[in-house]
Amino acid sequence: MKVYNDINSFTKVKQAVVTSGTFDGVHIGHQKIIKRLKDIANKTGGETVLLTFWPHPRLILYPDQPFKLLNSIEEKTRLLEQYGIDHLIIIPFTKLFAGWSSEKFINEILVKKIGTKKLVIGYNHRFGKHRSGSFEVLKKDSANYGFDVEEIPRQEIDHIGISSTKIRKALGAGEVDISTKYLNRPYCINSTVMEGDKLGREIGFPTANLQIDFTQKLIPSDGIYAVKVEYNNKFYLGMLNIGYRPTIKGKTKRIEVHILGFDKNIYNKKLTVYFYKQLRTEIRFPSINALCSQLEKDKIAVISYFKTISQQNR
């Protein structure tokens, strides 16, 4: 996949099959659009082009409103490459760009810069100043623009429309099994291991204290999770805690993971954590011994959970 951080560096390709959007999460609705893009390109001898915007428009338009993202631009780029996009154009989103009319976006970007031959958009996709651009607008004037336009119908799972917003809500409630269903993969965070207070080592459950690499990354709700940890291209089972550690009267939120069967010095190393299931919420225990007893149960629950899903996938 070729990546362009400046649209002026993009050279028109023959039979450009194009889509655009924020694609935060690259969920199964987005994947359906990408698949359709690839199918059309294969039939027409064209190449797929995906336009996205960074920073996320909401961070620019509503800077005072709290907002977390499912992906950093690096994570999104890796995902789009995995799904087989030929060309990724990242357009810097600014207040000036936000003021472009839909007509200007169509003419300047889709027609002049890209030479679009087929445009595929998702259900209810809007673009341009005041969100004035729509499928209806595109369809009405597509002959004048020189390209065909197609809208993908709303994607549903169990009659619930998939959206990045609903995935964020699921993660905010600790429902990582739902986010996995909507993303078609486990939600993950990329992190750097920082030195902690080493209390976990003292009680027999050493943990890696994680600092999230992308500060605007959405973190699932507080609780204990069954996870897989990727380190140095190998995967390990783990139990991860998000929260304030009330049993020891912690004052700051921590993200810590105990990696099963692992005993290496990994300070300042990179870890990717994949969320599979919330085991329980974080609670205050009457003593350290009571906490240790529960951690033993959590460890057994993690091993049992992954054993079960391994058997189901055979």
Image (cartoon, rainbow, N blue to C red):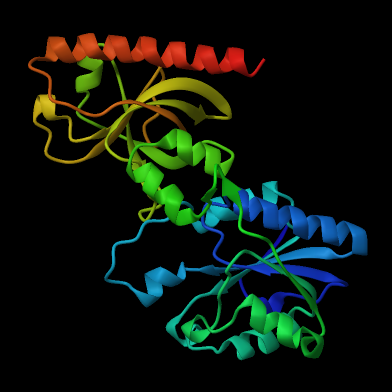
Q: In the rendered view, would you say 237 is above or below 112?
A: above
As rendered, which of 88 and 69 lies closer to the eye? 69
- Give residue 265's position: percent from left, percent from top: 38, 23
Quarter residue 87 falls in: bottom right
Image: 256 above or below 32: above
Viewed as shown, does residue 170 lie left or right of 223? right
Does residue 38 appear to the left or right of 105 in the view shown? right
Viewer can see residue 277 = yes
Place of residue 291 in the rendered image (x, y in percent of width and height, measured from the top left): 18, 15
The relative height of residue 213 versus residue 203 in the rendered view (above or below) is below
Q: Is residue 70 left or right of residue 17?
A: left
**Residue occupying image coordinates x 33% and y 41%:** 173
x, y percent for residue 52: 59, 67
Residue 261 seen in this snapshot: no
Residue at image coords 38%, 69%: 59
Q: Indicate the quadrant where residue 128 lies.
A: bottom right
Q: Residue at x 56, y 78 (%)?
A: 127
